[in-house]
Amino acid sequence: MNALVAYFSATGTTAKAAKALANAVGGELYEIKPAVPYTSADLNWMDKGSRSSVEMKDIRSRPALADTNAPVAEHDVIFLGFPVWWYVAPTILNTFLEAYDFTGKTIVLFATSGGSGLGKSAAGLQVSAPGAKILDGRMLNGRLNEAELKTWVDGLKL
């Protein structure tokens, strides 16, 4: 498997999960960064006027990326990680998917969350990568065991 582990992490939690997964699969790691980093105030989901709240209310929202240098073309399998926001993937993931051609690629989702699952993330992202096969992966919260991650990935039969 020629894997890329691409991830967006607003607070560092998803970054830890992505690094553990990349180590487990021997994949290349790429951080999806917003052009304007999120502040604590931006992430305050209790504030309806916060940046993340406003973005998540509008499914057409596409926060700008800091770069478009992800080595997507070089990989067949992309593990795509994110924190769950409002039961789905943050809209910056749509921006990322729309910036590249994922035709013929398999995208496996993984996420972190304080309490919710992947929800309808795959459906919300599929529209941005119509030529790709997007699979609901799993939540990667807490302590991550490399052997357990390898077993999970092997079970995907990619």
Image: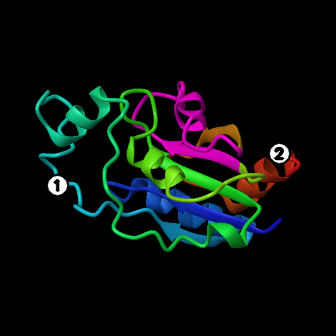
Residue under the point 16% across and 50% down: 40
* Mark number, residue 114: none
- Callout 1: 10 Å neighbours few (<14), some, many (20+)? few
Q: Which residue is mark 1?
A: 39
- Between 127 and 83, which is closer to the camera in this rendering? 127
**x, y (%) of residue 98?**
51, 51
Q: Is residue 103 left or right of residue 60?
A: right
Residue 123 part of the magenta-drawn span: yes
Q: Is residue 49 above or below residue 132?
A: above
Residue closest to the eye, 30 or 26: 30
Identify the residue shown where x is 88% and y is 48%: 157
Image quarter (top left, top right, bottom left or bottom right) of the N terminus: bottom right
Secondary structure under tag 1 reads loop
Q: Residues within 10 Å of mark 2 (few under 14, many from 20)?
A: few
- Is 111 in the magenta? yes
Q: Which residues are magenta?
A: 107-132
